[in-house]
């Protein structure tokens, strides 16, 4: 019954109840709290933005997994709005007496069947919210990948911010729905049933979070694409702690035929700089640039004479690295190498 979109509501009738005024007041307060907790006001603005973003994404992303997931999420948001739980709460609260001071004996309250109808709508509402949370995570994974590749930076950022807001609001709403369901279920026994059996053999779950099963695990999990505590490393990370340990060569004897040298061989002249493994000429791509800077930082820390920048101040060297770090985020491989060589000539003109 919970997944029927056009579930017909039972007649909203009032029946005599012998509940004391104190319990009626507590039930009314609980229903008023449920009405405020299940409001979609916080979810409305980001849901409106996501529908506009779908039109913006339809040209570039129409055949991608992320776009299909974001369309499904928009449909789920429309389903959540159709359920309209606050109106159910208003109908129930309208049947409560406004003043209980002089009432004695019996009071007119809504039937139990309408309370059961509201509980079933709460079940469907929770399922739709779980669906929204799951799809929001799928959308986030896709656009985080797009962002990491450097494609559609501004558009991906806007989508991620909007989807993150929807994800957060949907999680909170789902938690409130489970709480209000469990609370209203305990109130059901206080309402008088009518002659018409609304459930017809359908049994309501005692705890909504247990009934949701694995969907509830996604609601309560701490780690998600939106809650990554450890930020991703930048391209040029200059921390010495992350340097890789030098590889150790296997201790094996060298064959004699390799080390045997003809006594009359004089060889050819080779520039001594080519024997040095630590030189700015070895920078040919982003990876070699990162290794070069990391090794140079090690040599500067140890005050090793092999350091190419030992005569440069720490402030000037740090500023040089910051400029490279900023350039690595925006420039291509060839432009980054050109930028590095030009800056290197400025700080070490004699070593170029």
Image (cartoon, rainbow, N blue to C red):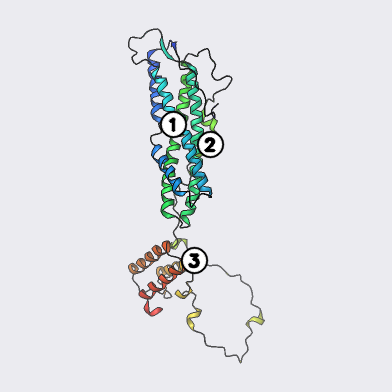
Closest to the observer, 84 or 182 = 84
On the image, numbered disc 3 is attached to which residue?
287
Within-10-Å neighbours for mark 2: few <14, some 14–19, many 20+: some
The answer to which quarter of the image holds residue 332 is bottom left
* Residue 173 location (% of width, % of height): 44, 34
Label of residue 214 in the image? none
Q: CA distance from mark 1 to mark 3?
A: 49 Å
Instruction: Tell me, yes or no, whether the two marked residues, 2 and 3, touch with CB atoms within 8 Å.
Output: no
Q: Marks 1 and 2: in contact by CB < 8 Å?
A: no
Judged from the image, the secondary structure of the residue bearing numbered disc 1 is helix
* Image quadrant containing the N terminus: top right
Q: Is residue 187 above or below residue 48?
A: above
Earlier sequence position, callout 2 versus callout 1:
1
Residue 176 — which label? 1
Residue visible at 50% across and 36% down? 130
Q: Nearer the viewer, residue 283 or 17?
A: 17
Helix, strand, or loop for circle 2? helix
Alpha carbon distance from label 2 to label 1: 15 Å
Q: In the image, 144: left or right of 342?
A: right
- Which image quarter holds the C terminus? bottom left
Q: Earlier in the sequence, mark 1 or mark 3?
A: 1
Residue 145: give x, y in percent of width and height. 49, 53
Helix, strand or loop status at disc 3:
helix
Which of the two discs, 2 and 3, labels the residue nearer the N terminus? 2
Q: CA distance from mark 2 to mark 3?
A: 42 Å
Is residue 77 or residue 264 the one in the foreground? 77
* Above or below 189: residue 125: below
> Residue at the location (47% across, 20% down)?
115
| x and y, in percent, of residue 319 in the image | 35, 66
Name the residue carrying label 2.
215
Asked where in the image residue 253 lies, by quadrant, the reply is bottom right
In this view, the residue farthest toward the bottom is: 264
């Amino acid at each position: 019954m919970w997944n029927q979109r056009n579930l017909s509501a039972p007649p909203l009738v009032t029946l005599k109840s012998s509940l004391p005024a104190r319990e009626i007041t507590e039930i009314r307060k609980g229903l008023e709290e449920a009405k405020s907790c299940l409001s979609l006001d916080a979810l409305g603005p980001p849901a409106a933005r996501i529908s506009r973003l779908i039109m913006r994404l339809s040209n570039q992303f129409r055949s991608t997994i992320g776009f299909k997931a974001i369309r499904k999420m928009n449909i789920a948001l429309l389903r959540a709005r159709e359920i309209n739980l606050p109106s159910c709460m208003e109908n129930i609260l309208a049947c409560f007496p406004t003043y209980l001071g002089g009432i004695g004996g019996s009071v007119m309250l809504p039937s139990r069947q309408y309370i059961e109808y509201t509980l079933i709508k709460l079940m469907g509402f929770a399922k739709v919210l779980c669906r929204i949370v799951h799809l929001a995570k799928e959308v986030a994974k896709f656009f985080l990948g797009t962002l990491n590749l450097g494609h559609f930076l501004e558009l991906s950022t806007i989508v991620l911010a909007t989807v993150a807001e929807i994800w957060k609001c949907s999680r909170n709403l789902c938690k409130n729905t489970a709480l209000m369901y469990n609370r209203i279920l305990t109130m059901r026994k206080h309402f008088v049933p009518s002659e018409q059996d609304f459930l017809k053999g359908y049994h309501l779950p005692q705890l909504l979070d247990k009934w949701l099963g694995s969907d509830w695990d996604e609601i309560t999990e701490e780690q998600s694409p939106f809650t990554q505590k450890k930020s991703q490393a930048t391209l040029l990370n200059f921390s010495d702690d992350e340097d890789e340990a030098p590889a150790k060569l296997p201790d094996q004897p060298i064959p004699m035929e390799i080390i045997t040298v003809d006594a009359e061989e004089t060889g050819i002249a080779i520039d001594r700089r080519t024997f040095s493994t630590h030189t700015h000429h070895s920078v040919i791509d982003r990876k070699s640039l990162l290794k070069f800077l990391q090794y140079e930082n090690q040599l500067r820390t140890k005050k090793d004479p092999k350091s190419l920048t030992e005569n440069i101040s720490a402030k000037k060297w740090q500023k040089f690295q910051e400029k490279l770090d900023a350039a690595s985020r925006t420039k291509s491989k060839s432009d980054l190498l050109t930028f590095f060589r030009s800056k290197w000539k400025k700080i070490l003109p004699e070593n170029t």
